[in-house]
Image (cartoon, helix red, strand yellow):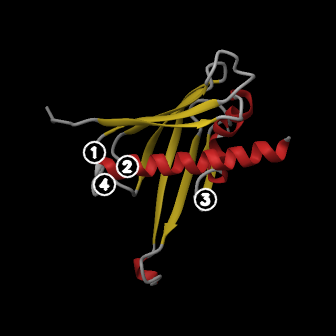
Amino acid sequence: MENRKIIGCKATVELAENSTEQVWPYIEDFCCIHKLIPLDICHKLEGIEGQPGLIRYCAITIKGDDADAETTIMNWAKEKLLSIDRVQRCLSYEVGENNMGFKSYVATMKVLAINEDAKEGGCKIEWGFVSDPIEGWRLQDLKSFIDSNLQAMAKKIVAACSEAT
């Protein structure tokens, strides 16, 4: 039997001025994650919007230090929506076929009220994951990647909520 080491962590960000009802629609929109984090491409490959089984394709171009075409690579992944709970405001997804070194990666994103009244007060977004170690990545690199993307998401959601009011 193969000896596997599973890693995991959770990143959290608070949105003090936004309710769960304001924030959840941005997280729930699975195939529009490119509007919240720096991706070049994110689109539906197959399945029904908002339903488990939906598969999205995400890609980003990474330029080398000298902007030489030979050092430019396209990182991509196919991600499958495993579950979505609109009442609890959470979803989970897994990374499938990819060229980034992920063998097994399952993430859960939750939007939680800071206080008991989800319609008032702030909320927080949690992004947790479990994964096999990723070739070429230290755990701290992966945690930093998740955290920086979550911070970027929060800024864009706060800005979008401000524009909507």
Q: Earlier in the sequence, mark 3 or mark 2?
A: 3
Residue 114, relative to residue 64: is it above or below?
above
Residues under labels 3 and 2: Cα distance?
21 Å
Horizontal and vertical percent position of residue 93:
50, 36
Q: Which residue is mark 2?
A: 142
Q: Residue furthest right?
A: 165
Q: Which residue is mark 3?
A: 41
Q: Which residue is mark 4?
A: 137
Helix, strand or loop at label 2? It is helix
Q: Residues within 10 Å of mark 2 (few under 14, many from 20)?
A: some
Helix, strand or loop at label 4? It is loop
Q: Earlier in the sequence, mark 4 or mark 3?
A: 3
Q: Amino acid at mark 1?
A: Pro
Q: Which residue is mark 1?
A: 133
Residues under labels 4 and 2: Cα distance?
7 Å
Residues under labels 4 and 1: Cα distance?
8 Å
Q: Is residue 99 left or right of residue 165?
A: left
Q: Amino acid at mark 4?
A: Trp
The foreground one among 108 and 104 is 108
Horizontal and vertical percent position of residue 67:
47, 82
Residues under labels 3 and 1: Cα distance?
25 Å
Asked whether the beta carbons under mark 4 and mark 1 sit within 8 Å of each other, the answer is: yes
Asked whether the beta carbons under mark 4 and mark 2 sit within 8 Å of each other, the answer is: yes
Helix, strand or loop at label 1? It is loop
Q: Is residue 115 left or right of residue 138?
A: right
Q: Residue furthest top?
A: 116
Residues under labels 1 and 2: Cα distance?
10 Å
